[in-house]
Image (cartoon, rainbow, N blue to C red):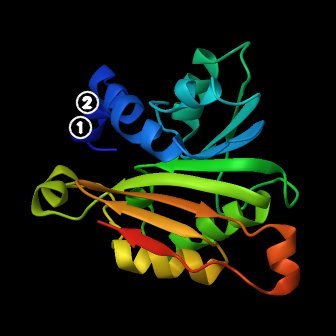
């Protein structure tokens, strides 16, 4: 993590942005259920907000130092912090009602690894479960912000196709100053019929 991230990501301003501008939009019309998994929480800007919406939140963080700090912050709560890679989640299929990843995909160095994470999330979601997420749009300013750091932004139209290819349906994208996405895992009836609603995209 470069100095820019070290200043921004733990800041109250960044947490407020996620909690005021991103998370309410993503969760307005969906039920997160009782068990949720958050991928790549970093310093936990979204974690406390999400924990108030579910009975149990599991946060999977690849950076051991960040995971320890997050675990200390949420000790004794309904948040379980796990250190590990989201490409190999150690949970049985259909373990979670919902999943979330917020402004972390562009830190994953290749599209193949991004897809592996999304596929693992799909696997551990129950039928009818939902993935919510957000990420920054590519820009010259963002490129310079990530100087010396991993920077692999997702392209919204390609993200739609990638989520659909993994099996998510329906998929909704909201593209503004960032990209927000809501991706459902088809329920048992849809899987048995081989039918899934087409994805949608909104500007």
Which x, y percent locates residue 93? 86, 61
Crowding at dot 1, Cα within 10 Å, few <14 / some 14-19 / many 20+, comes out as few
- Asked whether 113 or 195 is in front, the reply is 195
Q: In this view, does 201 lie to the left or right of 48?
A: left
Residue at image location 61% in from the left, 56% down from the top = 131
Q: For residue 147, what is the image quadrant?
A: bottom left
Does the image show residue 110? no
Q: Is residue 51 left or right of residue 179?
A: right
Residue at image location 18% in from the left, 55% down from the top = 142
Of the numbered discs in the image, which one, if any, rests on residue 3?
1
Residue at image location 61% in from the left, 46% down from the top = 30
Does 48 appear above or below 66? above
Determine whether label 1 and label 2 are within 8 Å by CB: yes
Which x, y percent locates residue 165? 60, 84
> Disc 1 and disc 2: Cα gap in Å?
6 Å
Does the image show residue 106? yes
Q: What element does badge 2 sit on?
A: helix
Q: What element does badge 1 sit on?
A: helix
Which x, y percent locates residue 25? 43, 43
Q: In this view, does 37 lie to the left or right of 23?
A: right
For label 2, the residue is 7
């Amino acid at each position: 993590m470069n100095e820019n991230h070290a200043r921004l990501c733990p800041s109250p301003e960044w947490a407020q942005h996620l909690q005021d501008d991103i998370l309410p939009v993503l969760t307005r019309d969906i039920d997160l259920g009782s068990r949720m998994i958050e991928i790549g929480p970093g310093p936990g800007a979204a974690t406390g907000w999400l924990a108030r919406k579910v009975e149990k939140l599991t946060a999977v963080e690849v950076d051991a130092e960040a995971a320890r700090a997050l675990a200390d912050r949420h000790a004794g709560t309904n948040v379980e912090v796990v250190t590990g890679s989201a490409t190999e989640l150690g949970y049985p299929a259909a373990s979670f009602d919902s999943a979330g990843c917020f402004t972390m995909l562009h830190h994953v160095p290749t599209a193949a690894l991004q897809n592996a994470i999304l596929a693992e999330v799909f696997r551990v979601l129950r039928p009818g479960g939902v993935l919510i997420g957000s990420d920054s749009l590519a820009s010259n300013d963002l490129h310079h912000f990530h100087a010396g750091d991993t920077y692999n932004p997702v392209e919204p139209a390609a993200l739609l196709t990638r989520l659909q290819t993994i099996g998510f349906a329906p998929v909704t994208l909201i593209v503004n100053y960032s990209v927000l996405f809501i991706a459902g895992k088809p329920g048992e009836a849809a899987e048995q019929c081989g039918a899934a609603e087409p994805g949608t995209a909104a500007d």
